[in-house]
Amino acid sequence: MNRGGWQWFITALKEFHFLRPWWLLALLALPLLWWLWKLNERRSNAWRGLVDAHLLAHLQVGGGRRQTLTLLGALLAWVIGAVALAGPTWRQEEQPLWQTRAPLVIALDLSDSINANDLPPSRLLQARAKVAALLRERAGGQVGLVTYAGEAFTVAPLTDDAANVALFLDALDPSIMPVAGSNARNAIALAQSLMHQAGFEQGQILLLTDHADENADSAARRALGAGFNVSVLGLGTRAGAAYRAANGEIGRAQLEPASLQRLASAGGGRYQPLSAGDADLKALGVLDPQSEDARAQRGEKGTAWRDQGYWLLPLLMLLCLFAFRRGGMLAAIALCVLLPMAQPAAAADWWTRADQKAQQRIEQGAQAYRKGDFAGAQVQFNGLSSADGLYNQGNALAKQGQYDQAIAAYDAALKQQPGMEDAIANRAAVEAARKQQPPPGGGGQGGEQGKNGQDAKQGGQQSQPQSGQSGDKSQDQNKDQQAPSKQDASKDPGKSGQDNANQDASKGKPQDGKPDETKSAAEQQQEQQAADAAQRQRMQQAMQQAMQQDGKPQDPAKAGQAQAAPETAAERERRQATEAWLRRVPDDPGGLLKAKFQLEYQRRQRDGE
């Protein structure tokens, strides 16, 4: 052995230890096993009661030696098995850090008291800023958002994308809540339900409020019993401040630290009053639930001792071969040789449960989906009967434009899991896309767009205007952008009215849209100018007719983004009036949430929940 080998050997001896040393206590059973073996040998020997002991040893042929070897082999196998289970090790290796992916559900109290201004400029704005900081700085784990007043509602289900949750913060206001009050008990129960539905058995619930009652304490204890901790971030000050309720009454809100500390103790969490900076969030443990999670998010790796006990398994299996009857050893060796020759996929299926196979297909489909191979993802998701498998199948179908099949897959997923909000949202989006899908045939829009001088592309999307541009650019663009046609435009329903107009006005052009080579360049230019003038005249007449019918100016975007004449004073006045009317429309970012909560509240009342 060279010098490097000796150094490695000495280092290995210094580092040698057992990962599970308690298994070495099994070696203490060796004397007991030897005694039990001897006792069984005496009882099983029928000649012992018939032949004297000094004569029995001479009458038996080889029996004692064989039994002794068997005993030694069994004891040696026991020692090897105990040492292997103890986990001998002498070196470390790098491995990715395990992430707990512990979820967090934020429950914000949106009762009228949040309008109090004891936390300038108001509790509401301070709470929004604090939640935004939490979503921005939290390392790892899924996040969800719940708001509550008299009832609790889901704003955003659990997701890995914290930025997606932050989009709803500006819409949070007491006015979106359908019923007044401050029911923290329902908020804790809803947060617990969200994590259960997502498949989590542990997680955190963070409540942002100024007080709590006994009902909330009992809900926190139930959540702790289910594996979910409840922490509280206090909103407000002890002095408090006045606020105006939705019904016009004046109330006063104060921070009640004692009730919030009691709630956090019942939920196995922590309590902190809201403060500047992130010290309160760090104290609550919601920014970095575990340091290992944060390191894993940064791509760092840890080290772990490698269990080397498996090196003893071949020796143990070799000893086990001698336990077979005569001829059995050969059969066992043949089985070990032929087993690796079996089909690898079939051999792997022997050790895989049905739910594990389904999970593997979901993971393979998700990889194909992320790579943009939606057809391949659909192949993996097909045949899965779980709610998640059907939901993923609907996503893959929707990406391929198969809206009807996607909606059917979403419906099947919702039939198994009615509360799957992602499936509900995606189904609504696919339903809207299906309604906007153009009818089959031609360019998709044909006739109506042809009146406005637009060309239609396949799928109903509009191309760049070809003629009729305002100013001097119209003539040049007509020369450069006029596309040749290989057949009569009247026979092609996808062609627009612009091509027909150009062909009607240009009498010297043949049906195929190409200029006659027998004419001079000057004649062709004159005919082109005549066609442009005729086109501008037709567009102007169409715009005037539309203005007379609707009483409003024609939208330039619907007219090929071009006008044949400058905007008149009457048109400008109408346009300015329309823009002023649009500016008077109130900006209500929370309108969607308000309608959603109202419908949910009505459903609960109808179902008696």
Image (spheres, helix red, strand yellow):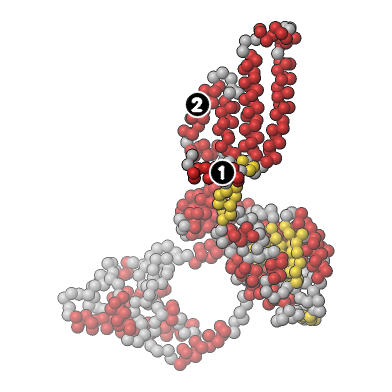
Q: Residue at x 64, y 42 (%)?
A: 18
Q: Which residue is mark 1?
A: 10
> Mark 1 against mark 2, which lies toward the viewer?
1
- Residue type at mark 2 is Ala
In this view of the protein, which residue sits in the foreground, 18 or 414? 18
Q: Residues within 10 Å of mark 1 (few under 14, many from 20)?
A: few
Q: Residues within 10 Å of mark 2 (few under 14, many from 20)?
A: few
In this view of the protein, which residue sits in the foreground, 117 or 279? 279
Q: Residue at x 73, y 16 (%)?
A: 43
Q: Is residue 129 above or below residue 145?
A: below
Q: Quadrant of the C terminus?
A: bottom right
- Residue located farthest toward the bottom when viewing the structure as drawn: 569
| Residue 477 shown left or right of residue 337 in the figure | left
Q: Residue at x 76, y 76 (%)?
A: 236
Place of residue 463 in the rendered image (x, y in percent of width and height, measured from the top left): 38, 72
Q: Which residue is mark 2?
A: 334
Q: Residue at x 31, y 84 (%)?
A: 533
Task: Note whether residue 419 is visible.
Answer: no
Kindly identify which numbered label has been placed on residue 132: none
Place of residue 116 in the rendered image (x, y in percent of width and height, measured from the top left): 75, 79
Task: Note whether residue 236 is visible.
Answer: yes
Tell me the SS state at disc 1: helix
| Residue 119 shown left or right of residue 459 in the figure | right
Q: CA distance from mark 1 to mark 2?
A: 40 Å
